[in-house]
Amino acid sequence: MKLTMKKLAYICLVLICPAFNAYAQNMQVSDPYLILNAGPDDPLYTTYTAPIERARLYGDKGYKMDHYTDENPLNYGSDEGGRIYNIWMVNKLVIPRMSEYHKRPVVKASFSDMALLEYEPFEGIHVEECFNVYSSRLAIVDMNIKNTSGKTQEIELFPVLDIRNDSMRILGFDEENNAYVTEHHESLERLISDLYAGYGYPTQLRDVFSGNFEPYSYGGFRGNLNDFYNYIKTDFYAETRYNDSLNFQTAGDCDFVSLHFKFSLEAGEEKNIRYTRGVQSMDEDIETLMNEVDRAMDVDLQKILDRNVEMFRSVPRIRFDDPQKKMVYLGAFNLARGCMLPPSGKTSYNFYVFSREPLWGWGHGHQVLHESLAMMAYAYLDAQSAQNSQRVYMEQQRADGLIAYRHGPRGMQDYPHYSKIYGDTMSTTSAPFYSWINWEIFRVSHDTSFLEDAYLSGSLYTEWLVKNRDADRDGLFEWGPYGIIENVRDWYNAVFQVSAERYLDVDKEDISDELECLDLSMMLSNEMQHLSKMAKVLGKEKEAGRWQKQAEQINKKVNRYMWDDSSGFYYSVNRDDHGFMFMTRDLRRQEIIGFLPLWTNAAPEDRAKVLLESLTDSTKFWRQYGIPTLAADDPWYSPYVDYCCKWNGPVWLLWDYMVFKGLLNYGEYETAEKLADKMYEAVQVQLSKNHNFWESYSPDNQVLNCPSNYIWDAIMAKVFIDLEEARKH
């Protein structure tokens, strides 16, 4: 009886509303620069998250679009929360995977929360599809389907919510809202680092899967895509055949649920289908989600698209000779934007996480200064938001000037650690890129109010560093007692780490607080130089001169103590005697930090030429995909990115960017351009293969096992912008 009623409802719906065009979206990208037309093998970043105004830190669901895998349908999936997709049936022919589409999906345009695609699942059936992560709770798939074949086509659609982690349970079907209501479990255990227990990460979640008109049928199923194909492919000889309808399951365990839409398209006719996936914690009020689902059925996606286009108005219009470079360029901005979240918890400013999709513990919830290098690129997209992100540090800066290792919605985290040198417990900070970032943001925003606040904050922070990171007061600097995280360079560091394979605990492994460290000394010189630039703009000439003089004093000492004539390179030295030996260890291991004196304009011209020889030596640093963190002829060198946080060979784009800037400082434009090409190739290869950015890259090969979609890779946009500026001058 129920099946008959469904058929009757379908017939009545066709008679009353033959076109189903109430929500039709023929979406237009008004800026031709943003039109990509990217195919499956193009370097397109395909991860999407909710915009700042409709996002939240906890219970936030991002998605990765798969428009490139032959054996899958076009789909949108999240790390732990399953995926959504549609199975096509045209004239009783089932088209379950992209390899069988008449024309594969082409991505017309892509933003941090939205993708526009065109494809033909069947000859003469043209689809314009928009995927939009409308909010942290809700994703929309909008399909405008047009019959261009010249004859009537019978179409059935099967939108699917596919969890398949053995936890999905149907709670019921809401007839009033045309929605399946289910629940599923998501673990706090993640590949890179687990989500923090005790915070607001939901583990038991409710799903609402709905369409914009009454489905012809619906069902819940066990199995996989092939099993579903076997079910819906009519077989007149099977006892349990599909027979025009799904199974109407309203309770029980399953792997996926499907809605079923059925209609005819006359020649030239078009229809709009929209389906949504809502998700929330089981502890939340379902009416809140239902109301949002209801609003999403009417939302004007063109207006969302127009706002995205408008945001990109401020991005420099670089005319690339290769359209794939533009895809990487625009994708870098989308990466940064997609990591931004609104004020919450203990901060009143928008902030970023390292990654929103996939979601992992260490990268979620707090900012760190070296990740904030991404703001130098992001400022071109949204200068105010980039400034607000830096204001998170200002807001939570300690009265004595400390900017701690992490800041964000859970407040300042300074990881106190006992210092043998000071004989007391000390706070942990981060690599000081602070005033450099603030200056670069100001160059875009021209906001003197921000500059005034940044100058005051940066001055206090730099003075704290001078007081707390120079135990012997000789003008050279050592990292703090928890240097293994403070110095950015984590594990497998040939100089700071005692053993090659981390045999000991952190305190026994790390010696970065017992050396005069080249990297920190150069970073402080760089901070002082940028404070000098700020002071000049603010009319503080005397202070500008003082900061510049202090920077020059550091540079002189670096050249006096840290340059080795015999190898033609800069190194960290023993704090006690400024020698290149620490106990029985030779500190002259050639790391990427040896090029930082180019970045700070500290290297004399003759030494710069010697450094350039080492840099462009393919047996050392001039590798296929960039400058490795350790010279390739070092016995600890490894090109394999088999986990996160390795500094014995992998390429880290933010450090290669500093080398790139150093080359431009010394007028080595052609070499800088070649390095930019290497960095681009590293990113382009991965985006073409798996459509991810990565925490680090192998200098020699293409296989990576490290955190994906890491915010600081947005620095690639700054590489292109700086190269364009240098080209013009």
Image (cartoon, rainbow, N blue to C red):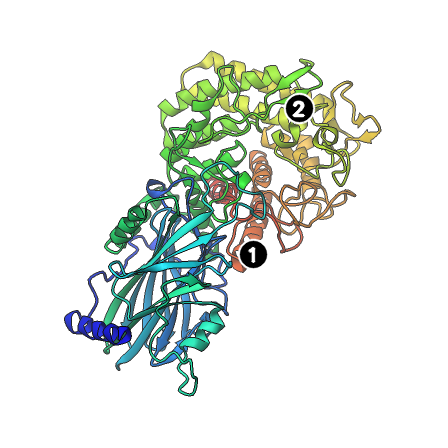
Q: Position of residue 382 (x, y in %)?
A: 37, 38
Snapshot quadrant of residue 180: bottom left
Residue at the extreme left: 16
Which quadrant holds the N terminus?
bottom left
Q: Position of residue 608 (x, y in %)?
A: 66, 33
Q: What's under tag 1, amino acid-wise?
A: Val
Vertically, is 575 above or below 41? above
Instruction: Give whichever of 416, 582 is nearer the camera.
Output: 416
Farthest bottom residue in view: 237
Provide the residue designation for mark 2.
Answer: 481
How far apart are the alpha carbons under marks 2 and 1?
39 Å
Q: Which residue is mark 1?
A: 685
The three-letter amino acid code for the residue at tag 2 is Pro
Identified at 71% across, 18% down, the residue is 420
Q: Residue furthest right?
A: 584
Q: Is residue 122 left or right of residue 400?
A: left
Residue 209 visible in the current orientation? yes
Q: Nearer the viewer, residue 542 or 415?
A: 415
Can residue 553 be seen?
A: no
Q: Quadrant of residue 467?
A: top right
Question: Looking at the image, is mark 2 or mark 1 earlier in the sequence?
Answer: 2
